[in-house]
Amino acid sequence: MKKDNIYSKTGVPSEKAKKIYFTGPILARDISVVIKSTNEKIYHVAFNNGSRTKLHSHDGGQTLIVTKGKGDLIIYKKLVKAKNNFRIKVTKIIKLKTGDCVHIPAMKLHTHGSTDKNTSFSHIAINSFPEKNREPKTIWYESDFKSKVSTVL
């Protein structure tokens, strides 16, 4: 294996990890750019100070491999849909720790990240291509998780 194809902490910062998609500070590195992957998008994401992803889904599914700390994955179901928003309901909470792997099927509404403001949490996220030669798309939502009403970002 050539050294220039090996991911390191000095990898490529992800251009897709916009602050509006997270509840706090994160560091995301795009591994797929370094290894020139053509079947999936691969990211290493570190969540700091209890940060999490906002509510989202992927059109090709996602696999998470926890590399450090404790976190969780929360799966939601869409309920009554209005024109620009919808209600949500938690259907599953999966606790995650270093070494755990979990697959999230395509179009499942979810959020994941750190569960503790005093510890860091990181994972490798593998976003599968939904079709050959078609990059995966992530659909992001805004939610307060109290009223259970969500809207597209």
Image (cartoon, rainbow, N blue to C red):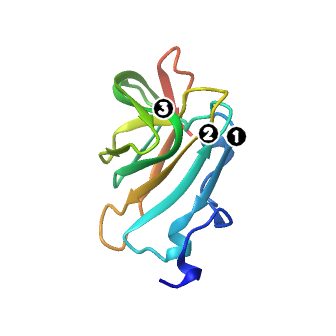
Depth check: give the residue in front, 117 or 28: 117
Tag 2 secondary structure: loop
131 lies above or below 103: below
- The residues tagged by marks 3 and 2 sit, at their Cα atoms, a distance apart of 21 Å
- Provide residue 149's location: percent of width, then percent of height: 48, 21
Q: Which residue is mark 3?
A: 84
Please state the horizontal and vertical placement of residue 28, each as a whole percent of the image: 62, 54
Kind of residue at disc 3: Asn
Residue at horizontal 65 percent and vertical 27 percent from the top: 117
**For residue 83, what is the image quadrant?**
top left
- Image spot of residue 34 (x, y percent): 56, 74
- For marks 3 and 2 on the same chain, the one whose residue lies earlier in the sequence: 2
Find residue 42 and name its label: none
Residue under numbered circle 1 = 25
Label 2 Cα neighbours within 10 Å, binned few <14 / some 14-19 / many ≥20: some
Q: Image check: 32 left or right of 104?
A: right
Q: Residue at x 57, y 50 (%)?
A: 45
Q: Which mark is residue 22?
A: 2
Name the secondary structure under disc 1.
loop
In the rendered image, the residue lying farthest to the top is 147
Mark 1 neighbour class, 10 Å CA radius: few under 14, some 14 to 19, many 20 or more: few
Residue at the spot 60% in from the left edge and 26% down from the top edge: 116
Q: Nearer the viewer, mark 1 or mark 2?
A: 1
Using the image as rendered, state which of residue 126 and residue 133 is in the foreground: 126
In the image, 107 versus 111, the foreground residue is 111
Find out whether the residues at labels 1 and 2 contact each other: C-beta distance under 8 Å.
Answer: yes
